[in-house]
Amino acid sequence: MKALVYLGPGLKRIEDRPIPEIQAPGDAIVKVVKTTICGTDLHILKGHVATCAPGRILGHEGVGVVDSVGAGVTAFHKGDRVLISCVSSCGKCESCRRGMYSHCTSGGWILGNEIDGTQAEYVRTPHADTSLYPIPEGADEEALVMLSDILPTGFECGVLNGKVAPGSTVAIVGCGPIGLATLLTAQFYSPAQIIAIDLDDKRLEVAHRFGATHLINSKDGKAAQSVKTLTNGRGVDTAIEAVGIPATFALCQELVAAGGVIANIGVHGEKVDLHLERLWSHNISITTRLVDTVSTPMLLRTVQSGKIDPTRLITHRLKLDQILEAYDVFGRASETGALKVIIST
Amino acid sequence: MKALVYLGPGLKRIEDRPIPEIQAPGDAIVKVVKTTICGTDLHILKGHVATCAPGRILGHEGVGVVDSVGAGVTAFHKGDRVLISCVSSCGKCESCRRGMYSHCTSGGWILGNEIDGTQAEYVRTPHADTSLYPIPEGADEEALVMLSDILPTGFECGVLNGKVAPGSTVAIVGCGPIGLATLLTAQFYSPAQIIAIDLDDKRLEVAHRFGATHLINSKDGKAAQSVKTLTNGRGVDTAIEAVGIPATFALCQELVAAGGVIANIGVHGEKVDLHLERLWSHNISITTRLVDTVSTPMLLRTVQSGKIDPTRLITHRLKLDQILEAYDVFGRASETGALKVIIST
Amino acid sequence: MKALVYLGPGLKRIEDRPIPEIQAPGDAIVKVVKTTICGTDLHILKGHVATCAPGRILGHEGVGVVDSVGAGVTAFHKGDRVLISCVSSCGKCESCRRGMYSHCTSGGWILGNEIDGTQAEYVRTPHADTSLYPIPEGADEEALVMLSDILPTGFECGVLNGKVAPGSTVAIVGCGPIGLATLLTAQFYSPAQIIAIDLDDKRLEVAHRFGATHLINSKDGKAAQSVKTLTNGRGVDTAIEAVGIPATFALCQELVAAGGVIANIGVHGEKVDLHLERLWSHNISITTRLVDTVSTPMLLRTVQSGKIDPTRLITHRLKLDQILEAYDVFGRASETGALKVIIST
Amino acid sequence: MKALVYLGPGLKRIEDRPIPEIQAPGDAIVKVVKTTICGTDLHILKGHVATCAPGRILGHEGVGVVDSVGAGVTAFHKGDRVLISCVSSCGKCESCRRGMYSHCTSGGWILGNEIDGTQAEYVRTPHADTSLYPIPEGADEEALVMLSDILPTGFECGVLNGKVAPGSTVAIVGCGPIGLATLLTAQFYSPAQIIAIDLDDKRLEVAHRFGATHLINSKDGKAAQSVKTLTNGRGVDTAIEAVGIPATFALCQELVAAGGVIANIGVHGEKVDLHLERLWSHNISITTRLVDTVSTPMLLRTVQSGKIDPTRLITHRLKLDQILEAYDVFGRASETGALKVIIST
């Protein structure tokens, strides 16, 4: 089968690989129908993800059709159309039982990282019963690809952790795909203000179309001041970090109101400064989270009921044999305007 | 009247001052019966608290007897015995209405800071109806002095923010008075392990008597390792920072388990490093808080019902005219073993 | 001044009354600009509210202009435009401090009940600082009349107590004004299904326009069955009782899914059957609540930000000297289609 | 093997039965070491549990040793010592994933009800990976038998649902084994008052030894009045129904304070009156629950750390071949003083 393989920092190519096989009773083999590329895949390609060894098939998102299942799988059968979660969850360990699937002792984010992933014609998914979701009759499969990772990440790490609430004020720092996924799902809770902050006016324009009530280009270094003005000097109830660098985390510390939350989504490569000399008395919380995908069933219901349209995140559609081009389009997002690129097999 | 006055960095003396008078309809004048010294008073004396100007009468804790009340006070009358909260709360502003009294727009921690405090024969308390608490018949007034600040601080900033729960594991980094107050109130929730960490064996010994299940002297730099051993490699559900320096906050980041909380109590004078390059995916929360004293009524009930004995924190008892000696005893705590020093008028 | 006075069961008339005067330091006298009629006013007129004595000026909703304030009032001044909360809150008692203003020891729902109300040219409002809300510049005052009672009631008793959540299923039993207010505010949380249930097709039609996703006329006695069909046999996560009779409460018990909530809003005149022989093992909650109006500041923000348009509840507009006609229109709602009737002075 | 078999209303006997065998990949066969009798077993014997057919081996509590496991079981192996949960949980269905194991679509309370139970030498346990718990080295196995059902039931249905909190007031109506299990676990949260109510002075005496702060014999019909006196007229924050009849549920409605909770534990055989004509405005919650046993890991930690001693509930110890005598002792609890009877194989 065709597969996109990571070959070491800066290196990737399409290879021909054997179709994966059941290795454990809980496994399923899924024929991939649609997959996509994540910002994390770019991190891997930069050599920043130590757990991902050269030779790995990338990809942790997608929808497909079950091709075979192990002896212990009871919820799925050959032919079932399924959503593949980016997080594998055994359903049995202490982390899984408390809903923290990301720290499953035999799962977590392993697809396209510690084991081969979805940017291929077939993928082996461990713990299938608790890591795949049946696709409802008539569902839009491209929409559901957005439920593998980006929507639950925005929702769980940004919106839920950030305690977005009716009438509250939210700042989203960084309007790339994950910031926009947060923006879409933040509206489940009807905040009064959603302030989108980015350096790129085109991205801010997209944020505006996606529901941001205020836009701030932070190029001039006055974003904190602008937010204070918009919030009568209070700052925001929820500051969402959706970039992953010290500067944006620093900005969030300036934006957050007393009693508020800084919800970190960004994948950070270095330590940041935390200004406890000022914040110790501000009654704030800072949260971090690797998505658990506990919200996937709920997100499926909101998609099915039309409360959210995840296809708004999709800007490009390509075939699996064009995946190198897809990576190129996605990697040059500031020029191409790419958000999510659907790759069909 | 006699009063302990801050005169600038390193300077204090007992002065004779006029008895304070009602300035606003919500004020009460309280004759102080017992007060105490807080670590924050030492911060002020080092010149670290910019809001506190020379000439200020220090002190924000105490019990007393109402001497007079302003026209707007309805809940208290001359002769009522009262507990004075370290935080003044108007009860009307948005912060007060959401229970965040520490950020009251016309109150917060002002006593012995922005206005004259309790280390005197009399004190003016603004917003008396919502900042004083009636002392129940038969209550131990020395015990209640511990409810002005130290117990609610330990409980709200450490225990509540830290989500201490039955069967959970807690590490308290720093076993000074505030760490010990946290230790006492953490036991309201029956955690399975309370690991006390300090550099001073004498303090650890006190922690043991107060209910710590494990003691770690962190002098050898192996505290994180020891905690991992005690928790089967997981780390603690709740790491409580009760010192206020970068090193102890760093230790908390090493101790906290995935899904856990770092609850900061310490008053920090400088920024700290936050290792988001590791913690971004650990599903943790970091909380900060200036005590709100919302838990004071609850703490009163636990004291009255014998669930907690705050007098265990009291090591010395002196008279107001010995307050310079009291400061000395309290300031040399490592030698004197002082925790809280009761000062009677 | 003109005022609508309750004279005993079935009896009311417009009387000329003296303008009220300040009685306590916390009082304000408010010149009423707009008021409205509540279903509870009809209950009083039937003689069902024992606390309301003949001779009482009715009304507990409205907006107005502050005419004078008592010595203890600090937040409002003559000329301020204010929203009058149906619940008076002292801000000081234990109930108020925990956010349960409805059980304020010197307030609660007293306006137009235990003391004279708002269906008059002027009203005395006790505890003004904590029972009035400033009207933001440029706000639609008719919209804000809906924030005195009906919107916070629907939101707090129905939506908050009912734990309405993104992707969840909600049934609203009874589509009168309060059921519709619940329907409007339930959408703050983006449930997947909102099933409106009533006996009157016209009301169901209104519910549809207001956002109900499914309509059930329960005349045929098969509502529970229809709900089961709509929810794949599960029942609803939230069943909201917005009528106040045994039959509708019984229906809610049939509708609620395991793990769900029955949120009672209805004012009941008699006991109901609770089928614990079936429900003891269903992991449900049943909640009751007299509105606390703690959500008023939040609702103001959602109105100001355009997240909700409360004027959709207003069907008629009359002058104070037409208030008997207004009562007639409101009392014959099934014929007149009346929801809320704005009465201007 | 020997087994206690239900033969229809009023009928039971010890029979010789074949050792059960693995039927599904998730099954385990456990050699029972210790089991016990539950009040629910008496309900079955009265013919009140329709799901339990004659011929059923009773019992849903116990500890044992794994004898064999199905192909899909990964967490347990032959020879492992295990605690058997009264609730079987598949870990995969929507109910299990939200922590409501009691409503597992292929599990729930089935042991000794819909399938053969633990009052036998061996038992087949479905969904073994997520329904058994490893017994920690050195644990007291008799103590752990109390964790199969009675302690999680008291804790989850009574204490957690009842929101018992530090400084709060609790009334426990009914001091049989389940009321006492609630009493023991309520103390995890340090309430200020725990008022035990029963008709039997001997049981009240036990409640006193177990930590009740006040005792009320409700024989005189004045329990509500006594509780009001003890709580300054407020009533209790948490009223726990631990009997299961209309009279005790009625009493809870009289006891509960505004803002409080009635947590139902009792298994009810008939409907009860709910006085909404009074309670609609009292801001209360009423909760029901079939134990989910989600708290079992936490309870294990509290037992291991010595925070609770469940063996206090054990009054008698007998062998499996004396189980008819054990039923007799347990059934005549008011004479024998039996709480829990340990049955060893």
Image: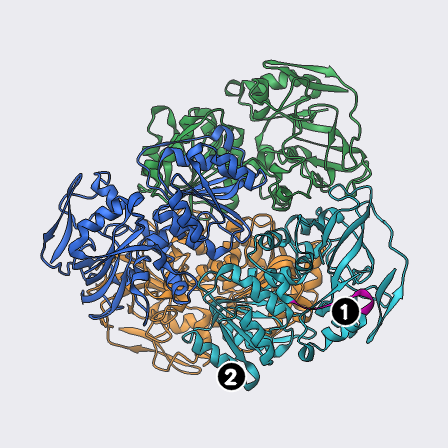
Chain colours: A cyan, B orange, C blue, D green
* Residue type at the position of mark 2: Lys
> Label 2: few (<14), some or many (≥20) within 10 Å?
few
Quarter of the image with the C terminus of chain C in it? bottom left
Residue bounds of the magenta highlight? A314-322
Disc 1 and disc 2 on one polypeptide chain: yes
Pick the front one: C335 or B113? C335
Residue B309 within the segment the image draws in magenta: no
Q: Is residue C201 left or right of residue B124?
A: right
x and y percent of residue D126 in the render?
72, 34
Residue shown at 28%/77% (left/top)? B16
- Residue at left offset 51%, top offset 83%: A222
* Disc sitting over residue A222 in the figure: 2
Name the residue at 25% across, 66% down. B26
Chain of the residue on which disc 2 is drawn:
A
User: Is A299 displayed left or right of A57 in the figure?
Assistant: left
Classify mark 2: helix, strand or loop. Answer: loop
One can see residue B86 in this view: no
What is the number of the mark on residue A49? 1
Q: Position of residue A46 (x, y in %)?
A: 78, 75
Residue D154 position within the rendered picture, expressed as x and y whole percent measured from the top left: 54, 36
Give neighbour class at mark 1: few <14, some 14-19, many 20+ (Cα, 10 Å).
some
Q: In the structure shown, which secondary structural element does the residue marked by tag 1 occupy?
A: loop
**In screen coordinates, is C170 left or right of D275?**
right
- Amino acid at circle 1: Val
| Residue D231 relative to residue D40: left or right | left
**Residue D251 visible in rendering:** yes
Q: Is residue D86 above or below residue D232?
A: above
Disc marking residue A290: none
Q: Earlier in the sequence, mark 1 or mark 2?
A: 1
- The residue shown at (58%, 44%) is D307
- For residue C49, which quarter of the picture? top left
Name the residue nearer the viewer: B338 or D17: D17
